[in-house]
Image (spheres, rainbow, N blue to C red):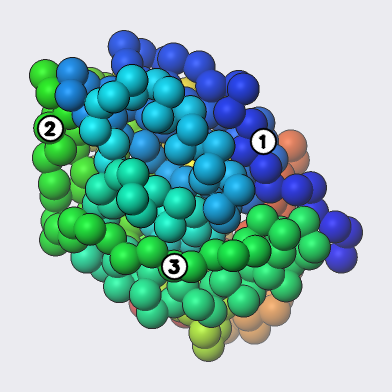
Amino acid sequence: MAELVAPVVDVGGAEEIARDVVVIPNRRLPLVPNIGVIGGSHSVLVVETGMGPRNAEKVLALATEYAKGRRLYLTTTHFHPEHAFGAQTFATEATFVVNRRQAEDLAVKGPGYLDMFRSLGESVAHELEGVALATPDVVFDESYDLDLGGRTVSLRATGRAHSRGDQVVGVDGVLFTGDLVETGQFAIFPWFPPHDVDVSGVRWLEVMRRLVEEHPTTVVPGHGDLGGPGILTDIVDYLELLRDETWRRRDSAMSEDTVVEEVTAVMLARHPDWAGREWIEKGVGCLFHDAG
């Protein structure tokens, strides 16, 4: 396997996309998320940490400078390493808020994901040096309205989809989706049987349909370029096609290997320029075993 590009957050690329809403773009680097900083009159919320303490230190420094004395909060869209494995860096500086299922995922699955990601290559293992999984300060069940002062940010658990603890963050028409949405690449299905099979393509599709109905103005995906509401419908279209092509072949009694081969060819023909081709097989595997 080729060594991955170092998953390093570049805070120098931070840009304001709406009033008091800043995004640090991932620059299409693997294992680097889009990161948000949202301000109100008395508090600032950081969305995602980057992978490991080094990245998180840069994000915290930018957020602290941006806050100019305002109180800091941190949330993450789900527990995966590039999104949440820098939370320890914020421990004495910010209040860490997530939904209950995400907190459980972080505690129960976090150690296994830490080991798995360390095995991806030296550059990834380097960023994960010194990681200690953080414990959230505030845990909510379904939704949490965070008052930043003259502005309320909505944190909402979506239910099981990409993970058990997926969470979206919305403010003034801007929606941070985490890995429910990517642009320019195939949907990331963390389908790793028997170790992790919580991803559900069927429930993911249901979540995406609900998000489309909200008509956000700006969508900040987990990875890839920001966009308008059309990138939500792009994901719906892809998940529907992946489901239909997988189930049609599964129901005709094809073997799983044959289904993977044929559906992969269909998806590559439909989206030849998308990255992350390895995730097609994972998505087919998930839907092949998903009863719907």
Q: x, y (%) of residue 36? A: 41, 32
Q: Which of 64 and 5 is in front in this view?
A: 64
Estimate how packed mark 2 is, as few (under 14), some (14 to 19) or many (20 or more) residues with alpha carbons within 10 Å: some
Residue 267 visible to the viewer: no
Q: How far apart are marks 3 and 2 (CA)?
A: 26 Å
| Marks 3 and 2, the one that precedes in the sequence | 3
Percent position of residue 129, x then y: 65, 64
Measured in 3D between alpha carbons, the distance from the residue under mark 2 to the one under mark 1, in whole angstroms, is: 32 Å
User: Which residue position holds label 1?
Assistant: 28
Residue 87 seen in render? yes
| Residue at the image point whose x is 31% and y is 11% from the top | 19
Q: Is residue 151 above or below residue 49?
A: above
Task: Give residue 10's position: percent from left, percent from top.
Answer: 64, 31
Looking at this view, is 105 or 63 the one in front? 63
Q: Do the residues labelled 1 and 3 touch (CB within 8 Å)?
A: no
Residue 120 vertical position relative to residue 91 in the rendered view, above or below: below
Which three-letter amino acid code belongs to the residue tagged 1? Arg
Residue at horizontal 18 percent and vertical 60 percent from the top: 139
Residue labelled with disc 2: 147
Answer left or right for 267 relative to 1.
left
Dot 3: element: loop
Label 1 Cα neighbours within 10 Å, binned few <14 / some 14-19 / many ≥20: some
Q: 11 above or below 195?
A: above
Q: Which mark is residue 170?
A: none
Q: Give the amino acid at mark 2.
A: Asp
Circle number at residue 133: 3
Mark toward the start of the polypeptide (1 vs 3): 1
The quadrant where residue 67 appears: top left
Extreme bottom residue here? 194
Tell me the element at label 1: loop
**Element marked by disc 2:** strand
